[in-house]
Image: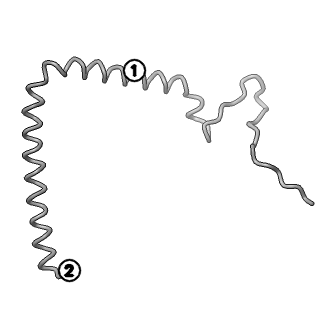
Amino acid sequence: MPWRGFLLANAGGAVIWAAVFGVGGYLFGKVLLQLHGAVGPIAFVLATAVLLGGGFLMRRFEIRLSLPNGRYPAPWNPSSRPRDRRQKSSPH
């Protein structure tokens, strides 16, 4: 593609992109202000539930998340290691 054609196409695409996102954002903002009274409390409850649930899950799986490969240590026998599922090849 010649550089002049590319320059025109790129500039035209930028203008169209800016117009679509600008007008879309403006209209979405107007609708969001109208729905704020009904959606606000629901969004707050959902965001709170997501944050508390995520914190609970991180706390619950803290040990597993901090170990490599997500494996649990064996709390009853500290010297035991997780078993390797791969078959050992025989020297034959």
Q: Residue lying furthest bottom in this view?
A: 2
* Residue 37 on image: x %, y %: 13, 19
Local crowd size for mark 1, using a 10 Å CA cut-off: few (<14), some (14–19), many (≥20): few
- Which SS class for mark 2? loop
* Residue 54 on image: x %, y %: 43, 26
The residue mark sitting in front, 1 or 2, is: 2
Residue at the spot 37% in from the left edge and 24% down from the top edge: 51
* Amino acid found under the numbered disc labelled 1: Leu
Q: Please tell me the numbered disc located at residue 28.
A: none
Closer to the N terminus: mark 1 or mark 2? Answer: 2
* Total tally of numbered discs in the picture: 2
Q: Is residue 40 above or below residue 14?
A: above
* Amino acid found under the numbered disc labelled 2: Met
Q: Please tell me the numbered disc located at residue 1.
A: 2
User: Is 40 placed left or right of 86 in the picture?
Assistant: left
Determine which quarter of the picture holds residue 77. Answer: top right
Residue at the spot 9% in from the left edge and 27% down from the top edge: 33
Determine which quarter of the picture holds residue 40. Answer: top left
User: Is 43 placed left or right of 87 in the picture?
Assistant: left
Q: Please tell me the numbered disc located at residue 52.
A: 1
User: Is 56 placed left or right of 61 in the picture?
Assistant: left
* Residue 88 on image: x %, y %: 82, 51
Residue at the spot 10% in from the left edge and 35% down from the top edge: 29
Q: Quadrant of the C terminus?
A: bottom right
Q: Quadrant of the N terminus?
A: bottom left
The residue closer to the viewer here, 65 or 42, is 42
Determine which quarter of the picture holds residue 79. Answer: top right
- Which SS class for mark 1? helix
Residue at the spot 16% in from the left edge and 80% down from the top edge: 3
